[in-house]
Image (cartoon, rainbow, N blue to C red):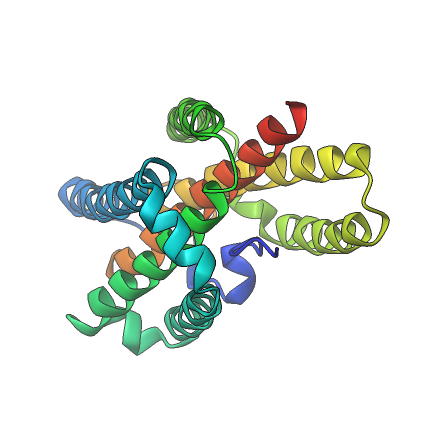
Amino acid sequence: MAQPGYMGPNSFGEDAYPGTFDFTEQSIRRGFIRKVYSILMCQLLVTMGVIALFIFHEPTKVFVRNNSYLFWIAFVVLFVCLIAMACCTELRRQTPVNFIFLAIFTCAQSFLLGVTASVYDASEVMIAVGITAAVCLGLTLFAFQTKFDFTVMGGALVAASMILLVFGILAIIFRSNIINMLYAAAGALIFSLYLVYDTQLMMGGKHKYSISPEEYIFAALNLYLDIVNIFLFILTIIGMSK
């Protein structure tokens, strides 16, 4: 089963601006960051609730397995919303349309994650959640305090994503546990770098590139996809190790 959201979010189009764009007021930057993380926390809470429903409520798991068309409907909805928000600047800046699209996208992504998580043991999912939370917290703190500018790495990360995509196709063809494990490890590493990259884009300041404060939906979407992909790859590694 194909995992949703494996492509790097910035490969769809990055509304980033050169370092000449500055948050001239500290209050503007703090307000932007607070808004992004507030939206992100709501997304993650919804996602965790849906995943918990799938792994702890057996009737839900059975119902979805008996109605597999729901997976494909959610996948199409996810793809349409993602393309719309990534490619249509006005759509993701216009309230409340941007929140509606983000909410639909989050629900679709949460459903797909719930279906994916349901094939693993609850203990494996909880371990993956804990590791993902620790990794993302550590990377976020690192992104905020490091003097190294990761925003210049956009091209390299897109190239790495393309290589990962090819690697994933080879993993499907050859079906080797070693290849699958290497693929998952490489994916977790690449999207960890994406998380640092997107965090620094959001921070602005002295970094070469930054995201406009109007792009809080796009910033939250990027961070959410980074975390989701890190979780999926870590869950894959844990599941294969057992």
Q: Is residue 107 left or right of residue 118?
A: left
State the quadrant of the C terminus.
Answer: top right
Residue located 41% across and 57% down the image: 64
Residue placed most toward the observer, 124 or 41: 124
The residue sitting at 21% across, 68% down in the picture is: 100
Please tell me in which quadrant of the rendered image residue 15 appears.
Answer: bottom left
Decide: is 70 above or below 170.
Answer: below
* Residue 227, placed above or below residue 89: above
- Quadrant containing the N terminus is bottom right
Q: Indicate the position of residue 149 as horizontal and vertical percent values.
A: 51, 37
Q: Is residue 235 visible?
A: yes
Q: Quadrant of residue 104?
A: bottom left
Locate residue 193, reporting x and y percent. Answer: 55, 37
Using the rendered image of the protein, determine whether residue 197 is visible from the camera's viewpoint.
no
* Apparent side of residue 237 relative to residue 85 in the rendered image (left or right): right
Query: Residue at 80% of width from left, 32% of height from top?
Result: 178
Q: Please tell me which residue is depicted at 49% across the width and 47% down the height of the picture.
A: 116
- Residue 147's place in the image compared with 120, above or below, is above
The one of 12 and 103 positioned closer to us in this rendering: 103
| Left or right, residue 221 beside residue 46 | right
Q: Nearer the viewer, residue 236 or 90?
A: 236
Name the residue at the right extreme.
Answer: 174
x, y percent for residue 131: 46, 23
Q: Is residue 52 left or right of residue 139?
A: left
**Looking at the image, how many numbered discs can be counted on the residues?**
0
What percent of the width, then of the height, locates residue 38? 19, 43
